[in-house]
Amino acid sequence: MKAFAKKPDVDLSIEFAGIRSPNPFWLASAPPTDKAYNVERAYEAGWGGVVWKTLGEDPAAVNVSSRYSAHFGKNREVLGFNNIELITDRSLEINLREITEVKKRWPDRALIVSLMVPCVEESWKAILPLVEATGADGIELNLGCPHGMPERGMGAAVGQNPDLIEQVTRWCKQYYSKPVIVKLTPNITDIRVPARAAMRGGADAVSLINTINSITSIDLDNMVAKPTVGSQSTHGGYCGAAVKPIAMNMVAEIARDPETQGLPICGIGGISNWRDAAEFAALGAGAMQVCTAAMLHGFRIVEEMQDGLARWMAEKGYRSLAEFSGKAVANTTDWKYLDMNFQTIAHIDQDTCIQCGRCYIACEDTSHQSIAKLIDASGARRYEVIEEECVGCNLCQITCPVEDCISMVPQPSDKPYMSWNEDPRNPFRESA
């Protein structure tokens, strides 16, 4: 087994909901964790844990061909990934045997088994002892699959119903003695509702997000979406870098909800590098699951993830993930509590500006006309911020292709903090 190199005074090991792992990077339940061959190669590469691809009752699910599509950037960079694959199409007996063998060979790595069976107590009562006998460290309830399985009363059909979430979680806590993690669907209005239901049912943790309903592209010659099965298609589950902002918001909503205070969170959604992982941790995640990045770049990406996270932690003086997990939660609030008297103004560093004019065009055409285009006698261009017109919206900084060329400078003010909740003009303000 591979030895883990650790940076001085930095310990990447975690204990998440009672499950120990040498690092916080786990492979999510998906094709990369479908069989022993993949899982053992992942462990050899350095992954701290895996969530075995979702098991169900026999007969096994039947998958279609093709199954994947993508949303591409200009240079064919995969921004988002879509799949219409179902749970494992291998028999329950084969999966259980391989899980048992892998856990025996890799006792120091986290191994969680994803499960999805009909929303009937007898179905859960039957499968849970079989999974417990494998020696796996815990289970993850797949209550979020957005395609195929909801049509059978499973997946998101359960994850969108708080009463069913609570009931299934209770069954699992009754018939299984190890940690129960509930995986939540993002295809819902308020993510706090299913998280609260899972907690009421006795969940040891939640993981999120599962994939988002999506259609990534249309074949305009044949007028059918991708991926195409014969002459038809369907919506699938969207994941990858594009979903990271959505996932982080939902993680933060649960982390700062008083009703789910202290509920361990495993972050999932667009985690592609160490910085993504650190950001999820800052919003309260105690472990992170990765899928799309591994599918696009292979298992070895975990080496850079570990190294980058360890170096950053050493630089900041953090000795463990727990020392900064959740530190950004207190600074995340509702819009109505933001300081309406706080002001920033854009500043252009003329030494690094390449005079491309993108900031000017964006501001002039779509924002507040607060950047002046100056042309001297020689015809040279120069862009300057009109401070009295700038509202500090950040658009110029975002469109600028030169990193740190445009900065947002906080302005001194003698006005006290005032939120919309305190503004006399707000008819809905809360009493002190």
Image (tube, rainbow, N blue to C red):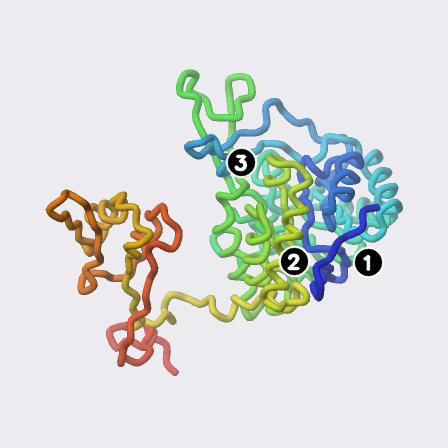
Q: How crowded is mark 2: few (under 14 residues within 10 Å), some or many (20 or more)?
A: many
Between circles 2 and 1, the one closer to the viewer is 2
Q: Is mark 2 on a helix, strand or loop?
A: helix
Query: Cα distance, mark 2 to mark 1?
Result: 33 Å
Measured from the top left, where is residue 339 in percent x and y? 34, 72
| N-terminal-most mark, 1 or 3 | 3
Q: How crowded is mark 1: few (under 14 residues within 10 Å), some or many (20 or more)?
A: few
Which amino acid does the dot numbered 3 rest on?
Phe
Residue 310's disc number: 2
Between circles 1 and 3, the one closer to the viewer is 3
| N-terminal-most mark, 3 or 2 | 3
Location of the C terminus (image quadrant): bottom left
* Residue to which mark 3 is pinned: 81
Query: Cα distance, mark 3 to mark 2?
Result: 28 Å
Image quarter of residue 44: top right
Residue 282 is left or right of residue 350, and the answer is: right
| N-terminal-most mark, 2 or 1 | 1
Residue at the image position 32 percent from the left and 69 percent from the top: 410
Query: Cα distance, mark 1 to mark 3?
Result: 35 Å
Is residue 196 visible in the rendered structure shown here? no
Residue at the image position 29 percent from the left and 71 percent from the top: 411
**In-front residue for pair 84/7:** 7
Residue 62 is left or right of residue 329, and the answer is: right
Measured from the top left, where is residue 322 in percent x and y? 66, 66
Which amino acid does the dot numbered 1 rest on?
Ser
| 243 versus 417 height, above or below | above
Q: What element carries label 1?
A: loop
* Residue to which mark 1 is pinned: 177
Q: How crowded is mark 3: few (under 14 residues within 10 Å), some or many (20 or more)?
A: many
Residue 103 is left or right of residue 10, and the answer is: right
Q: Which residue appears farthest toward the front when viewing the image? A: 378
Task: Evaluate if marks 1 and 3 touch, with contact meaning CB atoms under 8 Å apart.
Answer: no
